[in-house]
Image: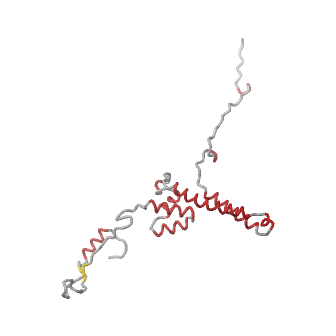
Amino acid sequence: MAMGIVSDKDFDKELGNLTPCLPIPCGNPRGTPGDNDRVIAEVVRIERGRGFDNVEVPNSLRQMIGEESTIQGRASALELANNFGISPSSVSAYANGSNSTASMDVQSNLTHINEAKLRVAKKARNRLVMALNSLTQEKIEGAKARDIAGIAKDMSAVIKTMEPESPKGLNGNSGPTFIFYSPQMRTEKVFEVVHVKE
């Protein structure tokens, strides 16, 4: 039989072709050693994790991979998903807040991802305030003020990146949009002239 992953049917067939006992002499459990005693091989299924024939990824793992992709980046999320045997396309779905690639429009885990973004944005806001408070008159006059301004700029970029997306309407506005149509005025030259005799 070739090595590799086989179906249960092929595995049971090959298991039946083998002798049910391995010819290894061992001690008789009753206390008298004998050459005819053999160790019987047994296949034991380990029941833990998702369970047998269950391919669904637990929701907590989906949330963890989605959060990892959002905060640490896609490469880190792919590495984490690879440890659990999850495909890269599923990582994209989890980063979107969806449960699978088939349901990308249903984002049931989006609130969890947005909460993770808000936690990072809050930390960046605190660092931004610290950096701005460090910009005193003395430090601005010194050479290190440029570095402090760079920190402030970087922290504001992190905040902007980590802000959760708000639903947007027409033209990128989140508020209501009003469209007014005005009728065009027509001159007499546009209309056809009909001359009549009286």
Q: Position of residue 50 (x, y in %)?
A: 38, 64
At a point 66% along the width and 34% down the height, the residue shown is: 181
Q: Position of residue 77 (x, y in %)?
A: 52, 66
- Numbered label tally: 0
In the displayed structure, 132 sits above or below 5; it is above
In the displayed structure, 11 sits above or below 153; it is below
In the displayed structure, 181 sits above or below 188; it is below
* Residue found farthest to the top: 198
At a point 48% along the width and 66% down the height, the residue shown is: 81
Q: Position of residue 29 (x, y in %)?
A: 21, 83
- Toward the viewer: 198 or 126? 126
In the displayed structure, 120 sits above or below 186; it is below
At a point 47% along the width and 53% down the height, the residue shown is: 103
Q: Position of residue 157 (x, y in %)?
A: 66, 60
**For the C terminus, which image quadrant?**
top right
- Toward the viewer: 149 or 74? 149
What colour scheme was applied to this rendering of the protein? secondary structure
At a point 71% along the width and 22% down the height, the residue shown is: 193
**For the N terminus, which image quadrant?**
bottom left
